[in-house]
Image: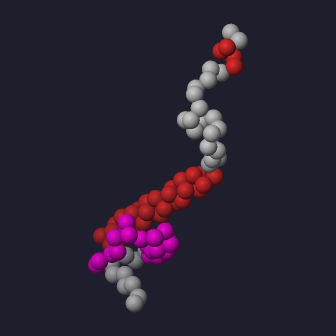
């Protein structure tokens, strides 16, 4: 079944994948750049484009967070920083520095 897009009932931006939002944004920009649309239609296209761009940015931000989490160093169990070892004073505190 193919998805039909009508200007009367646009698909909810929040349900679009990154690729769907990007592709529709490209189409919206092309229509705006071509000109010839009535003012009201141009404003509606602009608003839709802004919503699509925001949706794309949400996807990109989420991807960045996932990459950062995947690249973050992992602390081995039993090593400092895992909460299992008592807090020790830094070396420079004990020697009076």
- Residue depicted at x 64% and y 44%: 76
**Percent of width and height locating residue 27:** 47, 76
- Please tell me whether residue 14 is drawn above or below residue 24 in the rendered image: above
**Percent of width and height locating residue 42:** 36, 70
- Residue depicted at x 40% and y 90%: 1
- Please tell me whether residue 1 is drawn above or below residue 86 in the rendered image: below
Q: Which residue range is magenta in the image? A: 8-31
Magenta region, mostly helix, strand or loop?
A: helix
Q: Is residue 63 left or right of residue 9?
A: right
12 is within the stretch colored magenta: yes
- Residue depicted at x 57% and y 52%: 69
Quadrant position of the C terminus in the picture: top right
Residue 45 appears anywhere in the view: yes
88 is within the stretch colored magenta: no
- Residue depicted at x 63% and y 35%: 80
Q: Is residue 82 left or right of residue 43?
A: right
**Which quarter of the figure has residue 88?**
top right
Residue extending furthest toward the bottom: 1
């Amino acid at each position: 079944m193919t998805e039909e897009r009508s200007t009367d009932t646009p698909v909810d931006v929040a349900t679009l994948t990154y690729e769907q939002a990007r592709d529709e944004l490209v189409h919206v920009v092309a229509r705006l750049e071509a000109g010839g649309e009535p003012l009201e239609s141009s404003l509606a296209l602009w608003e839709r484009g802004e919503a699509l761009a925001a949706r794309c940015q949400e996807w990109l931000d989420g991807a960045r967070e996932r990459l950062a989490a995947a690249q973050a160093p992992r602390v081995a169990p039993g090593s400092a920083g895992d909460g299992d070892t008592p807090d020790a004073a830094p070396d420079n505190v004990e020697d009076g520095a």
